[in-house]
Amino acid sequence: MSINILKRFLLVISLIVSGLSAQDKVDAIEAARQAKAAAEKAAADAEAATDAAIEQAAKNAAKGAREKIKQDRLDEEARKLAEAKAAEEAELDAAAAAAAEEAKRKMAEELGLEYTPPVGGADVVTEEAVTESTTTTPEEVAEEVLAKEALGWSVGGTGSIGFLNGAYITNTPVGGSIVAQTPYGFNLGEKFNFKVSLAGGIYQSEAEFEGLTEDLDALFVGLGVNATLFELVFSETHVGLIGAGLGLRNFSGVSLEKIMKKSLDLPVNILVGAESFIATKADERSGNSTYWAGLGLRLNYSF
């Protein structure tokens, strides 16, 4: 009996050991399965993370490319606008420079001065002219011409010998006058530029009254205007005192300005013409009105 009990005890022990051994094998397999599952999950997570990173990078690259294309288009539009504005400014500058040159030319013509166009012709606008045109006003152009050239004043002496006179005068007057032309005046149209001038002189002759012939010294002082047409024909008229009363003086003829100033480059001018007078009161003795005319020659100096 003891032997049977011992056998059974050994059998139980053997079963217990076998069970424990089998349980250890089951735990190892389960651990391996769980490790594999964990590895597979980690691999899946890594792949998902990689895909997400690739997709995000692709999105960022696409966004950057879109923004670059958009910025490039904006830069191109800005460049075109800047070029168009620069071209417009250059055109305006060229027009302004041409206008400035035209103003200089007209001012020189009005003052009877020689105008020298820019090198290359009137249609060529240099960079310097364009730069100056942006800051130069028409008034400054006029001042520049006046500063470089004449001031617009002139003084001339006229001598005349009479060839025609009224009945009161028995001996045709001979005399002379001085005329001072100022730079001040006014325009009538584009061709008539009138300048204010002052004149004074004395003319000697003889006159008969009540059977007596006496000297007639007619003093002349007047204020008037003068003008030159086509730099050739001139005329001036003065109103003032002639003799003992109100009178009118006119001197008209031909100007040699083109020859004296432009061809010979001289500051003087010669004028040849007829000088005529109308006196409402020749002297205090008779109080008669009269007239006379003579051939006049003037030498003018401009400064």
Image (spheres, grey):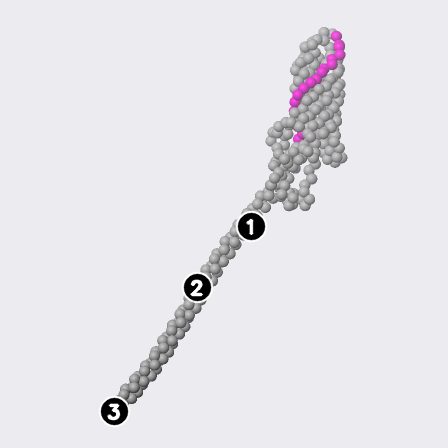
Which disc number belongs to residue 56? 2
Taking the view exactly as shown, the residue that stands out farthest to the front is: 2
At a point 48% along the width and 60% down the height, the residue shown is: 65
Where is the N terminus found, in terms of image quarters? bottom left
At a point 75% along the width and 19% down the height, the residue shown is: 175
Residue 226 seen in this snapshot: no
Instruction: Give the answer, above or below, for where 101 lies relative to 180.
Output: below
Q: Are marks 2 and 1 in contact (CB under 8 Å)?
A: no
Q: Secondary structure at mark 1?
A: helix
Amino acid carrying label 1: it is Glu
Give the CA distance from mark 2 to mark 3: 80 Å
The residue stretch that appears in magenta: 212-233
For mark 1, what is the residue?
Answer: 83
Residue in front for this viewpoint, 251 or 24: 24
Name the side, left or right, on which 209 lies relative to 193.
Answer: right
Q: Which image quadrant for residue 182? A: top right
- How crowded pointer 2 is (Cα within 10 Å; few <14, some 14-19, many 20+) is rated as few
Q: Earlier in the sequence, mark 2 or mark 1?
A: 2
Taking the view exactly as shown, the residue that stands out farthest to the top is: 210
Residue 159 seen in this snapshot: yes
Amino acid carrying label 3: it is Ser
Secondary structure mostly seen in magenta is strand
Which disc number belongs to residue 2? 3
Q: Secondary structure at mark 2?
A: helix
| 223 is within the stretch colored magenta | yes
Name the side, left or right, on which 68 lies relative to 41.
Answer: right
Name the side, left or right, on which 179 lies relative to 5.
Answer: right
Amino acid carrying label 2: it is Gln
Residue 278, percent from left and from top:
67, 17
Q: Are marks 2 and 3 in contact (CB under 8 Å)?
A: no
Residue in front for this viewpoint, 99 or 223: 99
